[in-house]
Image: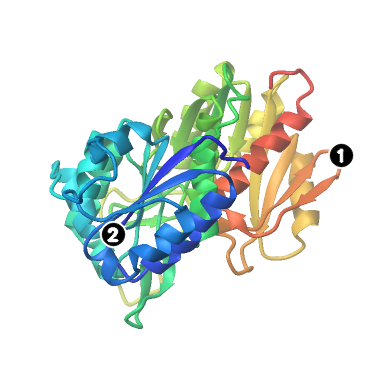
Amino acid sequence: MELKDKSVVVGVCGGIAAYKVVEVVSRLKKLGADVDIIMTANAQKFVAPLTFRSLSHRPVITDMFDEPEYWDIKHISLAKKADLFIIAPATANMIGKLASGIADDMLSTTVTATKAPVMIVPAMNHDMYSNAVVQQNIERLKGLGYIFMEPDTGVMAEGTSGKGRLPEPASIVDMAVGLLKPACDLKGLRLLVTAGPTRENIDPVRYISNYSSGKMGYAVAQAAAERGADVVLVSGPVSIGAPRGVKLISVNTANEMRDAVLKEFPDCDAVVMAAAVADYKAAEGSQLKIKKSDDDMVIRLEKNPDILKELGNIKGSRILAGFCAETDHLVENAMKKVEAKNLDMIVANDVTMEGAGFGTDTNIIKIIKRDGSVTDLPLMSKLAAAHKVLDQLRLISKNEIF
């Protein structure tokens, strides 16, 4: 009963993914949460309120002007009662309403009145999700403190494929549990996290980079902040917003990341280097666009600084963790990096495995420590994996900073 005495209000919007929220409610109830459901008029066309009433054992709110069973102002009482508000599936319409301050139905009115954390889980056609107005609304809400869970990529209801699918119910509940039950075991500590790719300019319109989305590093930063740490996140260019309560330092190149990391490093207790730093840069970048010609183009590359190795040489009593993405000999290659860079541990994943690696909301990781021990973890959300990484950091601490 992990969520005993916790109150969750689930707002269900009108989308085909509403059926998945049935399992979300079921899982929350099994964890002991007190769950109330608000359904929009369109949501009721996809799932009957009776289904949610049967699972939650509570009346389902479907209309602002329903005759109450007992006297209270329902949208105010639910807003005050909630420890967490989840909107899933969150439609473009509902996201637009909230971003514009519109409160014209029970769900938008209650969300507007709540002081609880609001977790928004978008699900819609991939072209709708990528629409500039929708993305602008999402960024506005993130800036106001709303918490977003990235949608999955895959086949949509209409048969096309793209980003916009509702994440699996287990992943949604994992994130909800993290928001409701932060461990607060890192309170008073300063953690430095790096995330995302770096970009090394060839000329003003071309660069060298990699497929990193930054999601794993951002998940580590979010998990650490939830557990009470003072978090500094040094991030390469990504398309996701910084977690609440995290100091974000945005960089582009490997040298910019190195400078930012070395500046913050002396004041940190531990470092998690999750960034995918480009190994090479153009030796002679051009200030002007290089014109295409009939000849082959040859670019001479030179090595970028190895930030992780440099930190290993000056780490002192700090805990230092790295990440590595491999395609073969995972443990062997990861262990070489532990030894070469003086790491306390490394988080390794095989990017060829389904559900792991770049751009996904899930990961399959192995946590390898300096003593050679390996913690093998199954497929899970990146946020859940991030908490496992922090758990292992605590276990290997030699100076009791955790």
Mark 1 is surrounded, within 10 Å at the Cα level, by few (under 14), some (14 to 19) or many (20 or more) other residues, namely: few
Q: Give me the disc on residue 231.
A: none
**Viewer-side residue, 140 vs 91:** 91
Specify the quadrant of the image occupied by residue 306: top right
Badge nearest the viewer, 2 or 1: 2
Residues packed near mark 2 inside 10 Å, few (<14), some (14 to 19) or many (20 plus): many
> Left of 98 or right of it: where is 165?
right
17 relative to 3 in the view: left or right: left
Examine the rendered structure and indicate whether residue 246 appears above or below residue 1: above
Above or below, comparing residue 345 to residue 186 in the picture = below
Q: Foreground residue, 166 or 142?
A: 166
Residue carrying label 1? 371
Seen at 23% across and 65% down, the residue is 42
Q: Where is residue 213 in the image (x, y as percent from the top left)?
A: 45, 53
**Which kind of residue does numbered mark 2 sit on?**
Cys
Secondary structure under the numbered disc 1 in the rendered image: loop
Gap between marks 2 and 1, in whole Å?
50 Å
- Describe the element under mark 2 as helix, strand or loop: loop
